[in-house]
């Protein structure tokens, strides 16, 4: 398949992958300690964004839209962000440059993030434009952050803890390296990481 030309998050997750309480417990801050809440919330968001970029995973359910210049030659295509829970729609600009919504009976979701053609169906031809194919899907472990794998939460906590302890990122690299985080990312790694 042609490389994706654009990826948009159309509906963000309803909550963060970590709770403020989880971060405070990891940092051994009292639950009633409120002066760091805004900073911790920003660190949680940044760590989540870093993980999603590094791993190719969405953590809490969100809607995504991807744009491609053409359909693949193969009878399947892999969506770039998973785990995919549903394909909402596949649209394409036909030979006359008119947007068409493709009937869902022509394809199915299988193997996590793989969209496969139905038996005896071919991809339609498209007009020559960078956004000729538009696919909308839902990715994430669930709407509730309790479905996020514990190993992923641990990686997020490592990043939050490191960034909280060294706010200016000035500490000795040997003291605050990313080896543990990197090992956890590699375990869930997408092709082509880093």
Image: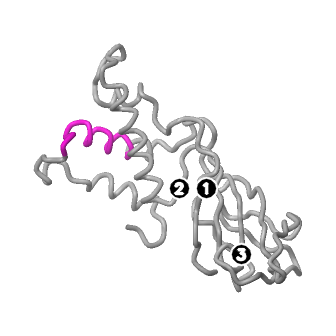
Report which residue position mark 1 lands on: 83
Up/down of 132 relative to 83, above or below: below
Quadrant housing residue 71: bottom right
**Mark 2 Cα-neighbour bin, 10 Å: few <14, some 14–19, many ≥20:** many
Percent x, y of residue 29: 29, 22
Marker disc for residue 30: none
Mark 1–mark 2 distance (CA, rounded to whole Å): 6 Å
Report which residue position mark 2 lands on: 57
Up/down of 107 relative to 73, above or below: above
Q: Secondary structure at mark 1?
A: loop
In the rendered structure, which disc, 1 or 3, sits on the residue that comes first in sequence? 1
In the rendered structure, which disc, 2 or 3, sits on the residue that comes first in sequence? 2
Residue located at (41% from left, 29% from top): 22
Q: Nearer the viewer, mark 1 or mark 3?
A: 3
**In the rendered structure, are the residues bearing label 1 and label 2 in contact, judged by CB atoms less than 8 Å apart?**
yes
Mark 2–mark 3 distance (CA, rounded to whole Å): 25 Å
Percent x, y of residue 59: 54, 47
In the rendered structure, which disc, 1 or 2, sits on the residue that comes first in sequence? 2
Quadrant housing residue 135: bottom right
Q: Magenta stretch containing residue 109, yes or no? A: no
Q: Magenta stretch containing residue 166, yes or no? A: yes
Percent x, y of residue 72: 69, 81
Q: Is residue 22 left or right of residue 182?
A: right
Report which residue position mark 3 lands on: 132
Q: Is residue 24 left or right of residue 103?
A: left
Magenta span of residues: 155-168
Residue located at (60% from left, 36% from top): 14
């Amino acid at each position: 398949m042609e490389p994706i030309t654009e990826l948009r998050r159309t509906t963000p997750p309803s909550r963060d992958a970590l709770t403020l309480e989880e971060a405070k417990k990891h940092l051994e801050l009292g639950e009633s300690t409120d002066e760091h809440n805004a900073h911790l919330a920003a660190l949680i968001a940044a760590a989540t964004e870093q993980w999603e970029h590094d791993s190719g995973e969405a953590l809490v359910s969100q809607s995504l839209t991807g744009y491609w210049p053409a359909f693949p030659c193969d009878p399947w295509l892999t969506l770039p962000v998973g785990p995919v829970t549903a394909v909402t729609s596949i649209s394409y600009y036909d030979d006359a440059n008119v947007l068409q919504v493709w009937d869902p009976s022509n394809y199915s979701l299988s193997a996590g993030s793989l969209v496969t053609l139905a038996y005896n169906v071919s991809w339609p031809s498209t007009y020559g434009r960078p956004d000729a194919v538009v696919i909308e899907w839902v990715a994430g472990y669930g709407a509730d952050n309790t479905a996020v794998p514990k190993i992923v939460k641990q990686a997020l906590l490592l990043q939050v803890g490191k960034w909280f302890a060294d706010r200016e990122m000035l500490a000795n690299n040997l003291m605050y390296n990313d080896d543990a985080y990197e090992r956890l990312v590699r375990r869930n790694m997408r092709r082509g990481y880093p």
